[in-house]
Amino acid sequence: MSQPSLYKERSVKIYDRGITESTTAAVVVEIPLTVYVNDTELATLVCSPGGHKELAVGFLLSEGLLQDYSDIKSITYNEQDGLLWVDTVAPVPQLENFLRRQIASCCGKGRAALYFINDARKLKPVQSDHVFEAAHLLHLIGLLEEKSSTFRKTGGVHSAALGDSKGMLVRYEDIGRHNAVDRVLGYAFLNKIDPKDKCLLLSGRISSEILIKAAHYGIPVVVSRSAPTFLAVELADEFNLTLVGFARGERLTVYSHFERVSM
């Protein structure tokens, strides 16, 4: 099935050093996707077109609302209205806590931060002895950049991918960093891909939320062309994840659990 384009052409005028030019520019498309779990409206995600099932499932996985593939009873998508329903085999007990957290986040950073820390503390350390060659991680990041065609056209999307010691398994681009990661995780979850020997590849900053998404799925190595935050590094230490930043050209920086990167 062909994927929808992530951008559209738009007539524009460019002013450059006193000269005006009429031309066209590629502009990224954003759409709303409203996700329901067992007929309860959960969230509206502003995202790029396509891969909506993977995005929704990855989002639910990252939020701790899905644990196993067998939890899912059915997935229904109404493309015209941008509505997606995920029905589960059994009620989701974490759903009420998620909805409370969403309401609390509107009432001030302190209460939202409390829910965030409590969610993080429920995670278990990632178990994996897999070792990646540093040169191979740089090769994978190079592939991520090479294949990011929409970014080169528009400058308006982020990229995320899943890799292993052989190559890149799946890649997505999205207007949101979190969405791109959720799409990758949703794909892995729906295709029952074992995370223990995989790495998550990113084009953008490694924030604490991104790190927690990787921990939820059990991916032991997170690699980015960009920088990590200090909280992400601290959480990587706590959850036994290897965090690699500034992976560009022939250079990278390992911030935690060095034993998984052979140099």
Image: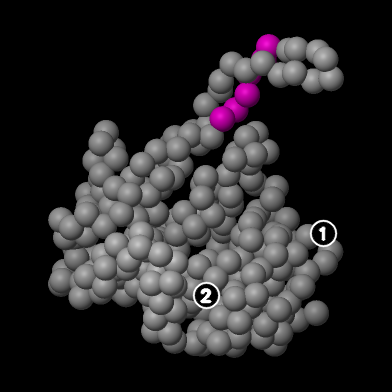
Disc marking residue 26: none
Q: Could you classify mark 1 by the number of other residues whose Cα lies within 10 Å: few (under 14), some (14-19), or many (20 or more)? A: few
Quadrant of the drawing holding the C terminus: bottom right
- Foreground pick, 66 / 132: 66
Could you tell me which residue is drawn at 68 percent across and 11 percent down? Answer: 22
- Check disc 1 and report its element: helix, strand or loop: loop
Three-letter residue code for mark 1: Gly
User: Circle 1 is placed at which residue position?
Assistant: 249
> Which residue: 59% across, 74% down?
232
As drawn, 182 above or below 127:
above
- Label located before the other in sequence (1 or 2): 2
Magenta span has 220?
A: no
The percent position of residue 51, horizontal first and vertical second, equals 40, 47
Give the Cα separation between the discs numbered 1 and 2.
24 Å
Q: Give the residue number, with chain letter if any, for mark 2.
A: 219
133 relative to 128 in the view: left or right: right
Amino acid identity at mark 2: Ile
Q: What residue range appears in magenta?
A: 22-27
Q: Quadrant of the N terminus?
A: top left
* Residue appearing at x 65%, y 39% in the figure: 155
Chief SS of the magenta region:
strand
Q: Is residue 92 above or below residue 130?
A: above
- Regarding residue 1, the answer to whether it shows in the image is no
Circle 2: element type: loop
